[in-house]
Image: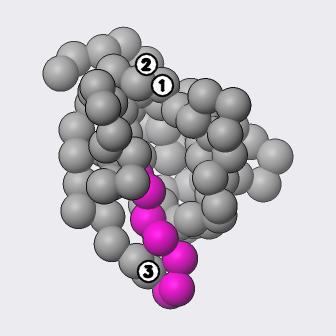
Amino acid sequence: YRTPGYTAAAGPLLRVGDWRGQVVVVEHRGRSVAVTLTDSCLCGERAGLPTFLDLSDAAFQQLAPLSAGVIEVNVRVGGLTLPATDTR
């Protein structure tokens, strides 16, 4: 699934209905990036937080340096903001 812009792999909680191609907004410490869900990931729980998605390197770098590894984010899907999660 090819798309221009930033992309992410969706975890099980985001793979509902026709999810491929859906755009979600990922927020971290006042910064945000819109990403298109193009692939799936297992994305399990880490440090007690669910992992909803795995960002592409380019999308991650809009929020934090790659050296941060894993960061806590909020994910907005439509008008709904999901509880805090982490991503890499």
Q: Residue 44 appears in which quarter of the rendering?
A: bottom left
- Range covered by the magenta-colored residues: 47-54
Dot label at residue 5: 2
Q: Give the side of residue 27 with respect to residue 88, left or right.
A: right
Q: Are marks 3 and 2 in contact (CB under 8 Å)?
A: no
- Mark 2: which amino acid? Gly
Which residue was labeled with disc 3? 46
Secondary structure beneath label 1: strand
Look at discs 3 and 2 and give the one toward the viewer.
3
Dot 1 amino acid type: Val
Q: Which residue is mark 1?
A: 23
- Residue visible at 44% across and 37% down in the picture: 58
- Image quarter where the N terminus lies is top left
Query: How far separated are the C-alphas under marks 3 and 2?
Result: 27 Å
Magenta stretch contains residue 12: no
Three-letter amino acid code of the residue under disc 3: Arg
- What is the quadrant of the C terminus in the image? bottom left
Q: Earlier in the sequence, mark 1 or mark 2?
A: 2
Q: Where is residue 17 shown, x and y percent of the image? A: 30, 32
- Dominant SS in magenta: loop
Instruction: Judge left or right: residue 5 versus residue 16.
Output: right
Disc nearer the start of the sequence (3/2):
2
Seen in the picture, residue 53 relative to 70 is either above or below; the reply is above
